[in-house]
Amino acid sequence: MSGTYILQSNRASFNQNSVDPTCPLCNEAPETLSHFVLNCSLTSEIRKPIIADIRFEIERLMPNTWDSFNTDEKVYTIIDCSGLRHRGK
């Protein structure tokens, strides 16, 4: 997420050669940012407790917020929670 890892979907869209956008970890879906952060089945055991902690803290500070987020909002909140300041106003 710091820009050092290139997602397969990005590599495929910018590469002249044929690059498969499928996630190399799970081989189940295109490796997009939302797939990598929220959905990849291979990383679910690691991801679930982390997202549960993030969700708990958001709900503690701003009740009923997490469930109102769309997928992109969840991804960007996980990556950088500073956007929550604007949402609480």
Image (spheres, helix red, strand yellow):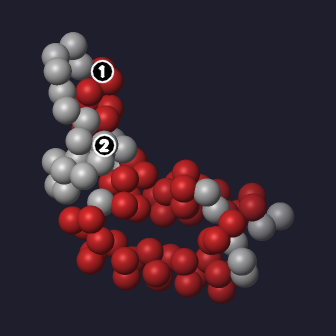
Looking at the image, is mark 2 or mark 1 earlier in the sequence? 1
Q: Secondary structure at mark 2?
A: loop
Q: Is residue 40 visible?
A: yes
> As rendered, which of 23 and 78 lies closer to the eye?
23
Name, please, the residue furthest toward the right. Answer: 89
In front: 79, or 18?
A: 18
On the question of residue 7 being in view, the answer is no
> In the image, what residue occupies the spot 62% across and 77% down?
58
Q: Could you tell whether 38 is left or right of 72 in the image?
A: left
Q: Position of residue 21 (x, y in %)?
A: 25, 36
Judged from the image, the secondary structure of the residue bearing numbered disc 1 is helix
Q: Quadrant of residue 14?
A: top left
Q: Residue furthest front?
A: 28
Q: Label 2 is placed on what type of residue?
A: Pro
Q: Is residue 73 above or below residue 3?
A: below
Residue closest to the eye, 19 or 57: 19
Tell me the distance, in whole angstroms, between the alpha carbons under discs 2 and 1: 15 Å
Residue 30 - label? 2
Q: What residue is at 75 percent from the left and 61 percent from the top?
A: 87
Q: Which mark is residue 14?
A: 1
Residue 29 at x, y percent in the picture: 29, 48
In which quarter of the view is residue 22 placed? top left
Residue 78 position in % (x across, y down)? 48, 63
Q: Is residue 19 above or below residue 33?
A: above
Q: Is residue 85 above or below residue 4?
A: below
Image quadrant containing the C terminus: bottom right
Q: Amino acid at mark 1?
A: Phe
Task: Answer above or below: position of 74 versus 32.
Answer: below
